[in-house]
Image (cartoon, rainbow, N blue to C red):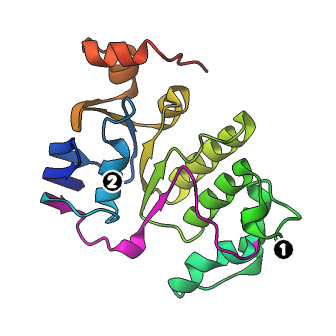
Amino acid sequence: MLKIIKLEKKIGDFQLNVKDLSLEEKTIHGIIGNNGSGKSTLIKLMTGLLKPDTGVMDFGTLTKRDIVITAPRPYMLHDTVYNNLTYPLKIRKQVIKKETIMEWIDRCGLSGKEKQYAPSLSSGERQKLSLARALIFEPEVIFIDETMANMDPDSVVLFEQIIFDIQSKKPATWIIVSHQLTHIYKLCQCIHFMDAGSILASGTPDEILLHTDNPVIRQYLSKYTIGN
């Protein structure tokens, strides 16, 4: 169980205050809410990219090497697609198997581009490479911050299937921030709704997205369509 207790962070006029949040391990969690509600700030705190003003984050025996985060605008190493994928394995001194690298390149629709300069890829291709690079070393905890926002629908479906495949073989803990509610509903087992820097509600996808009585959440949901 990943636990957060009395976490506070002030950035300008914004105040994040998460009193108590427990994230069950080997579960896919979704974090949703309006822009400015604190979703990205929360996961930056959880991954160590920001330091909290106060509070406790208990990740048990996990270290930074067990955790990965992907961003809305992923950074590409100024190198080839292939070497971008080998990098997380190198820094963790894991064995690099060419067949595994090529399998991931093929799997995320980048076949034939292994020698291409990664920053020259299209926006959607960089997003796919970013996700593949995050997953290739089999992390314990994966934070996804709007990384699928610029992907075409087929690529979103592809990575949904990759996530389900991972969960069926070697489950990880996922924390996914997204405004794509159909995607969140399909993937997540638990959803946390943020409002004004706090967790307003947590529950199953049905409880939060389909049957909530909370007026703030209902107002948020009125802007979106949850389809198949």
Q: Is mark 2 on a helix, strand or loop?
A: loop
- Furthest-front residue in this view: 12
* Residue 125 visible here: yes
- The quarter holding residue 110 reads bottom right
Which residue is drawn at the image coordinates 55% and 32% (left, top)? 183
Q: Quadrant of the N terminus?
A: bottom left
Q: Name the residue type under label 1.
A: Lys
Whether tag 2 and tag 1 are in contact, CB under 8 A, the answer is no
Disc 1 packing (10 Å; few <14; some 14–19; many ≥20): few
Q: Name the residue type under label 2.
A: Glu
- The quarter holding residue 222 reads top left
Which residue is drawn at the image coordinates 61% and 66% (left, top)? 133
- All told, the count of numbered labels is 2
Q: Residue 25, which numbered label?
A: 2
Residue identified by numbered label 1: 115
Relative height, residue 143 to residue 35 (above, below): below
Q: Is mark 1 on a helix, strand or loop?
A: loop
Q: How far apart are marks 2 and 1 (CA)?
A: 37 Å
Q: Magenta stretch: give its range.
A: 56-80
Which residue is drawn at the image coordinates 58% and 85% (left, top)? 90
- Furthest-right residue in this view: 112
Q: Where is residue 132 in the image (x, y as percent from the top left)?
A: 64, 61
Task: Answer left or right for 105 relative to 162.
Answer: right
